Image (cartoon, rainbow, N blue to C red):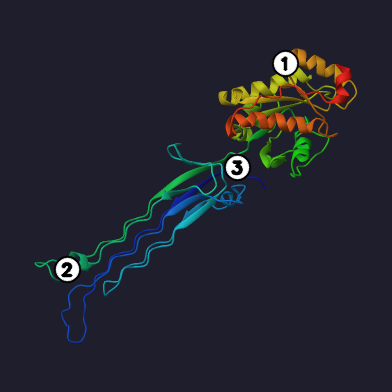
């Protein structure tokens, strides 16, 4: 189950109480105060852990409390400190204070760590209050309470490439062809119910992380279809690959209209999405009538569309290189973008 939102309550451990004690040993009947300090309460930490993919562990358990510190004891012995509580979160988790809605930390890299609630300090024992004029103190401090807060966790997948498009555009098929991911593939809409990640391996030891986002429909930013439940994941991607069904079924939007619908939904959800680098890809060019549809689409779009067939595995190598060249603007020196590559079997149709 893919869980990308959760609300939790965290509380650090309280500090241990200080001890009131006097040393009473043979030959030392008036040894003086020897009460020790209480132990420090455990703190609550969040860490971006490798191998954690969802917030499932936090959807069923809402209270996370660290261990209290132990009280001090005689012979000036300090109480044992409480164990810290480590919350292992997936990389890409945003941590918000639920009461103020302020962003506390964006755990966007594996290994990042932050203290969410600091444990309370231990109280001082009566040994700490002894002075030349007050040699038998009988007071001690209570431990300080640990900090507590209510948090909202929100997961945004971290990927280089985000696949977007209307339902049944072929995003899951394309992801399965470019990587070893095995998303559900079926001839009906919304087969992808949650985002899927895959890693594309290119020659020269190059890698790209690709995210397949569930299909969007008109009004998605307002909750239509799967709504904006997964639109937040596209904000993490560097490049958007807009997949268009070049031969849509009867009753479905025309290719140019499908492009307009998705672009409008992305822009309405977040203006930042409209500014991301985009690669337009026309899928299913192996179907009858694809040549004429491709020519019409290129006339209607503001940018050239790259023709491929994910099912027939045509044009995928050129697509990978085009995606990598776009990513090179972020990962290294810029390289010229392959704006348009036409498979050999389509050249006669143009």
The tag earlier along the polypeptide, 2 or 3, is: 3
**Depth-wise, is mark 1 or mark 2 nearer the camera?**
1
- Position of residue 313 relative to residue 266, above or below, is below
Label 3: state its secondary structure: loop
Q: Looking at the rendering, which quadrant does residue 202 occupy?
A: top right
Residue in front for this viewpoint, 121 or 107: 107
Is residue 293 something that shows in the picture? yes
The tag earlier along the polypeptide, 1 or 2, is: 2
Is residue 216 something that shows in the picture? no
Place of residue 219 in the rendered image (x, y in percent of width and height, measured from the top left) = 66, 24
Q: Which residue is at a point 54% across and 44% down the rendered structure image?
A: 109
Label 1: state its secondary structure: loop
Look at mark 3 in the image and give the residue it sits on: 4
Q: Is residue 263 left or right of residue 133?
A: right
Q: Which residue is at a point 69% across and 31% down the rendered structure image?
A: 323
Look at mark 2 in the image and give the residue it sits on: 137
Look at mark 1 in the image and give the residue it sits on: 301
Residue in front for this viewpoint, 74 or 180: 180
Q: Is residue 207 left or right of residue 290?
A: left
Place of residue 276 in the rendered image (x, y in percent of width and height, measured from the top left) = 60, 26
Label 2: state its secondary structure: loop
């Amino acid at each position: 189950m893919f869980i990308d939102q959760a609300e939790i309550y965290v509380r650090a451990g309280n500090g241990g109480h200080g001890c009131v004690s006097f040393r009473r040993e043979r030959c030392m009947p008036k040894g003086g105060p020897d009460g020790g300090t209480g132990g420090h309460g455990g703190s609550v930490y969040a860490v971006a852990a490798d191998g954690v993919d969802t917030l499932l562990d936090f959807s069923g358990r809402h209270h996370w409390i660290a261990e209290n510190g132990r009280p001090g004891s005689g012979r000036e012995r300090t109480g044992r400190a409480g164990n810290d509580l480590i919350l292992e979160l997936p990389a890409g988790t945003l941590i918000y204070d639920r009461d103020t809605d302020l962003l506390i930390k964006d755990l966007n890299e594996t290994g990042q760590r932050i203290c969410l609630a600091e444990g309370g300090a231990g109280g001082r024992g009566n040994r700490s209050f002894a002075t030349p004029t007050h040699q038998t103190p009988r007071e001690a401090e209570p431990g300080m309470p640990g900090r507590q807060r209510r948090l909202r966790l929100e997961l945004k997948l971290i990927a280089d490439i985000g696949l977007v498009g209307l339902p049944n555009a072929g995003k899951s098929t394309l992801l399965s062809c470019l990587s070893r991911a095995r998303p559900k593939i079926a001839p009906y809409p919304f087969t992808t119910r949650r985002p899927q990640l895959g890693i594309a391996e290119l020659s020269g030891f190059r890698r790209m992380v690709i995210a397949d986002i569930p299909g969007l429909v008109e009004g998605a930013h307002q909750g239509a279809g799967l709504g904006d439940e997964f639109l937040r994941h596209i904000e993490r991607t560097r490049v958007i690959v807009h997949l268009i069904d070049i031969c849509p079924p009867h009753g479905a939007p025309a290719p140019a209209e499908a492009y307009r619908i998705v672009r409008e939904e992305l822009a309405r959800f977040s203006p930042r999405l409209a500014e991301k680098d985009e690669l337009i890809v026309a899928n299913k060019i192996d179907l009858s009538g694809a040549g004429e549809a491709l020519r019409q689409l290129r006339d209607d779009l503001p940018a050239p569309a790259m023709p491929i067939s994910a099912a027939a595995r045509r044009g995928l190598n050129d697509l990978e290189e085009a995606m990598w060249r776009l990513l090179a603007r972020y990962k290294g020196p810029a390289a010229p973008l392959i704006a348009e590559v036409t498979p050999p079997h389509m050249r006669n149709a143009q």
